[in-house]
Amino acid sequence: MRKIDVCLSPELVGSFDLSGKLVVVVDILRATTCMVTALAHDVAQILPVATLEECQPYCQRDGFVTAGERNGIQLAWMDLGNSPLAYTSGDYAGKTVVMSTTNGTLALDRSRAADQVIVGAFVNLKAVTEYVKAQSRDVLIVCAGWKGMVNLEDSLFAGALVDRVEGEFQHETDAPLVVQLMYRQAAADLSGTVYRSAHVRRLHNLGIKDDIDFCLTPSLFSLIPVLQGAALVPLSD
Ligand SMILES: O=C(O)[C@H](CS(=O)(=O)O)OP(=O)(O)O
């Protein structure tokens, strides 16, 4: 039977053998929600980079848009912050977005050794679930967390995914059961639960509100970003 596991923080990725695995990277608030939304609104590709030093050279370059944040705040030289709503107008169609965020792009960077890396968020939960179910590979969900720590919203997404593939995968450790139980407890009021999280508090302190409800909206898009070389592009059927 195929196996599924959950890595609750990028700091723990080194404890997992990524070879031959499908990795689903998740950073609900807000990096992976941005990635799905951007590609669903015809951004050509996303170059996720772990450091600002890798991002800044693309500043003002034709065809490129720089995006991201540190501690939730957009850097002065960036074109965009880390709001998924920035992409919904379609203004960045055809562009390459070079993105660096505090947690999300780091989680992606640490997952590169996997057989395949895809991006999950509540906004593409159904599509990710169907893709995971169709796999013959073992699956690892990598939660971006917050600065090396476990967070609630990524763990809840992991629980939602584990719950939806119940019976089709064997749990490799206890982590899938932990997040599944947590998700089942929270499922009746998922957004009410996430609103109690430290990340929502941080974003509210920065005056960021609309992004949160958007990030918690299930299955708005059927698109799945996949890492192809250095770039995230839409997974083709
Ligand atoms: O922009 C975000 O939501 C966060 C910022 S913070 O580090 O939690 O302040 O970044 P992300 O990499 O999307 O978690």
Image (cartoon, helix red, strand yellow):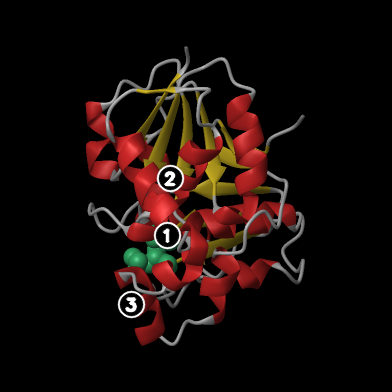
Most distant residue in the top direction? 1
Residue 231: image quadrant is: top right
The picture places residue 3, in percent across and down from the top left corner, at 42, 20
Disc number lying in front (3 or 2): 2
Residue behind mark 2: 159
Q: Say the numbered circle drawn on residue 157.
A: none
Mark 2 or mark 1: name the one nearer the start of the chain: 2
Disc number lying in front (1 or 3): 1
Residue pictured at 50% horizontal, 62% vertical: 188
Q: Disc 2 vs disc 1: Cβ atoms closer than 8 Å?
A: yes
Please, what is the three-letter code of the amino acid marked with disc 1? Ala
Figure check: 172 above or below 68: above
Residue behind mark 3: 202
- Regarding mark 1 in the picture, which secondary structure is present there? helix
The one of 190 and 59 positioned closer to us in this rendering: 190
Please, what is the three-letter code of the amino acid marked with disc 2? Gly
